Image: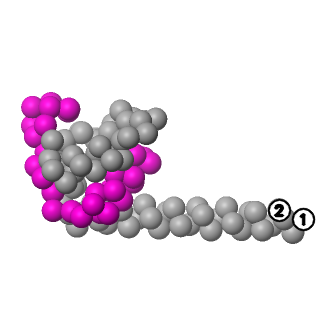
Amino acid sequence: MKKGIISLMAAAALGLAAQAHAADAQELAKSKNCLTCHMVDKKLVGPAFKDVAAKYKGDSGAVADLSKKVINGASGTWGPIPMPPNPVSQEEAKALVEWILAL
């Protein structure tokens, strides 16, 4: 019985930690102006973050590749409008990409 309660408590703690991480990443996206061109569930200037997550689902190199695109900018993947380089650190880019891919 104790094992079940401990497992349940651990799962709840992990769930809360994941929610906190997601909230932090979403705030980071707001502060870095990502939401000027992107929305979570609708195309704006750039693709919806959920569309990005779907496109890269199962791609083991997606975090590294997309982090580079966030930092350096990119063009051609989602149409003719380029994404400019963004003023984020490697850690910030990784946190943003991990959040997007988890959607």
Residue at image position (47%, 67%) is: 20
Q: In this image, 5 relative to 48: left or right?
A: right
Range drawn in magenta = 75-103
Q: Where residue 4 is drawn, which disc sits there?
A: 2
Q: Position of residue 56 (x, y in %)?
A: 37, 36
Q: Is residue 87 part of the magenta span, yes or no?
A: yes
Would residue 53 be seen by someone viewing this image from the given angle? Answer: no
Q: Position of residue 74 (x, y in %)?
A: 15, 41
> Amino acid under label 1?
Met
- Quarter of the rendering containing residue 50: top left
* Residue 7 appears in the figure: yes
Q: Residue at x 53, y 67 (%)?
A: 17
The residue furthest right is 1
Asked if disc 2 and disc 1 are in contact, CB closer than 8 Å, the reply is yes
What residue does disc 1 label? 1
Query: Up-down: is 83 above or below 22?
Result: above
* Label 2 element class: helix
